[in-house]
Image (cartoon, rainbow, N blue to C red):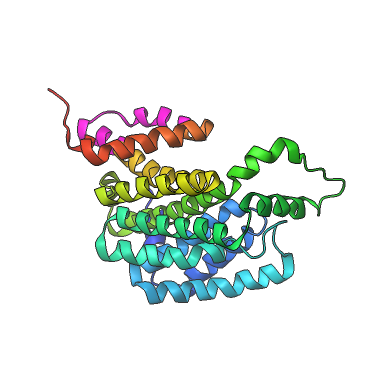
Amino acid sequence: MKSTALPDFASWLPGNIWLAGAFAGFFGVLALRLPPVAIVSAAFVALTALDGGFQRGVLTAGIGGVLVGAGWWLLGTPPGMAFPWVFALWPPLLAMAEVLRRTGQQGRSLLVAGGVMLAFVLVMHLATEDVAAYWEAWVHRAVSSFPAAVVPVADLKEALRLLNGFIALVYGLSLMLSLLLGRWLQSLAFNPGGFALEFQRLSLPRWALALAVALVWTGGLLDRLLLADLMMVAILLYFFVGLAVVHGVIAVRGASRRWLIPVYLLATLLPPQGLATLAALGAVDTFVHFRAQRGGS
C-alpha cells in the first residue's frame, strides 16, 4: 500500500510556522558546514510562503533566522563566506514564492531569480574596479585558514575570470531549486500531480529573450568579463526552460520517462555542455513551441 506519510507531512507543516521555521533553521545550521543543504532550508520557507502568503513566509524565515544566527555564533561560517548562505537565499525566495502563489506560473518566478542574478553581477562590476582581482583576493583569504595551503594562481587565472558569473549561476540555481522543492512538497498534499504539469508549462516571454540578447551584446561591448557573466545568467534562465521543454515533450508524446535519464546525466556529469544545450533548446522553444507539437500516430 502506498505510504501517505510524506503528503500528510507536507499538508500540516505549512500551517505551523513554528515547526516550519524550526526545520528551516535546522537545515540552515547544517548548511554552515554543508552549503548545498541551504536549498532544503530555503524550501521550507518557500513552502510556507506558497501556502500561507508572504507574511507567513517572513515569519518562518524569522524563526529559522534565530536558529541560524545562534548556529553562526557557535560554529562560524565556511572559509570565505561572510554570512550564512541561507540569508542570501530567503529574501529573494520569498518574493519568488509570492509571485508563483499569485500567478501559478513558474516562469514568472524564474524571471525574478534572473533579476536577482543580474543585480548581483552588475553590483559586483560596479563595486569593484577589477572583479577578477577581487575574487582572486577572496580565494587567497578563503584558503589561508588551511595550514600550508598553496593557491596555484597561474593555473586558476582563467577560472577566476569566470568565478563571478559562476557564483551568480549557483545563486540563481539555488533559488530556483529551493522554490521547486517547496512547490513539490506543497503539491504532494494539496495538488497531486500538479507540480509536474506546472513545470512542463514553464516558459519565458519573447521579450525576455530579446532583453537577454541585448544585455549580453551590450556587455560584450563594455567588458569581456561582463559578457561572460551575463551569458551565465542567460544560460541558467533558459536551462530551466529547456528542461521544462524536455519534460513537456515527453508528456505530450506519451514517451517513457526513461528518456529523461540521459538528459539529467548530461547536465550532471558534463554541466557546461548540459546547461548550454538545454539553454539553447529553451531559447529556440520561444519561437518553435516544441510542447505544442504532438507526435504522429
Quadrant containing the N terminus is: top left
Extreme residue in the right direction: 148
- 213 w.r.t. 11: above or below: above
**Looking at the image, can residue 232 be seen?**
no
79 is within the stretch colored magenta: no
- Image x and y of residue 79, in percent: 73, 56
- Image x and y of residue 161, in percent: 61, 44
- Image x and y of residue 254, in percent: 22, 31
> Left or right of 58: which side holds 269?
right
> Left or right of 96: which side holds 139?
right
> Left or right of 14: which side holds 64?
right
Residue at 73%, 53% in the rendered image: 137
Frontmost residue, 216 versus 2: 216
* First to last magenta residue range: 246-266
Residue at 32%, 39% in the rendered image: 282
Extreme residue in the front direction: 221
Quadrant containing the C terminus is: top left
Majority SS type along the magenta span: helix
Quadrant assignment, res 52: bottom left
- 270 w.r.t. 40: above or below: above
Residue at 61%, 69% in the rendered image: 68
Frontmost residue, 141 versus 146: 141
Residue at 38%, 35% in the rendered image: 278
Frontmost residue, 76 versus 173: 173
Quadrant assignment, res 277: top left
- Image x and y of residue 13, in percent: 42, 66
263 is within the stretch colored magenta: yes
Extreme residue in the top direction: 297
Frontmost residue, 197 versus 91: 91
How many numbered callouts? 0
- 77 w.r.t. 261: above or below: below
